Image (cartoon, rainbow, N blue to C red):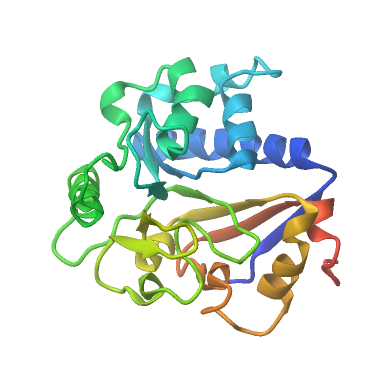
Amino acid sequence: MEGPEIRVLADVGEVCRAAAEEFVRQADGFVRTNGRFTVALSGGSTPRGLYRLLAGEGESALPGRIPWRQIHVFWGDERHVPPDHPDSNYRMAREALLSRVPVPPENIHRIPAENPDAVFAAEQYAQTLHDAFRLTAGQFPRFDLILLGMGPDGHTASLFPGTEALRERERPVVAQWVETFQASRITLTLPVLNNAACVIFLVAGQEKAETLRAVLQGGGQPDRFPAQLIRPARGRLLWILDRAAARLLTSLG
């Protein structure tokens, strides 16, 4: 894999607009080539802005450029809550995007996080991936696009520093207890994230600056900064940043 592409834009609004254009181009290209576009969505405030743009908020031309009926929507991770819970990544995406565009209901593949057993919910989602991607034994799904964010601690999806999930190499989805939040999270694992055709990180805000410098320009500390572990083997890695998050980066050309 070549090094990551890094784009630094003025503010979070520009980050969302650039990501929206990437989404449109990729959706169109993959539908033309393969007849469908598979995308794993992220939670968080910056992706919410992206989803609102894709739904037409403030820029009505975008929805008409997207082949919604050929898009299959998944999630990179989920909180262990029901789909109507305020903390649900699914609920955020539904309210900001999916309830406002014509994606067929059967093309929306959410994580069944309402299951009281988080481990079983992860197994159910793994079966969903197996069926949707028509996988054979030992195969991992290859998403066309995975959207990711990064926390101030360097976590991405629900891969947190120092956790066992960082070492998972066989299962596509795992559930783990996250001590910081006193809650379980369900997440795609590194073999899936690094099998994508394209991974886009959206990072905004000055509170991310120190960690972002460590992830992109510091030494390799993947157990401390899990975002360093995202390195698609046969794909593209793009970081779209606002100036506040990128303020400590050097030598960007």
Nearest the eye: 104 or 96: 96
Position of the N terminus, as image quadrant, is: bottom right
Q: Splitting the image into 4 quarters, where does residue 35 fall?
A: top left
| Residue at horizontal 40 percent and vertical 47 percent from the top | 79
Q: Splitting the image into 4 quarters, where does residue 154 fall?
A: bottom right
Position in image of residue 76 (x %, y %): 42, 50
Nearest the eye: 205 or 250: 205
On screen, residue 142 versus residue 137, left or right, reads right
Q: Is residue 67 visible?
A: no
Position in image of residue 29 (x %, y %): 49, 38
Is 118 placed above or below 30 here?
Answer: below
Nearest the eye: 196 or 105: 105
On screen, residue 118 versus residue 155, left or right, reads left
| Residue at horizontal 32 percent and vertical 73 percent from the top | 168
| Residue at horizontal 23 percent and vertical 63 percent from the top | 139
Q: Is residue 208 visible?
A: yes
| Residue at horizontal 83 percent and vertical 53 percent from the top | 244
Is 1 placed above or below 200 here?
Answer: below
Is 82 placed above or below 243 here?
Answer: above
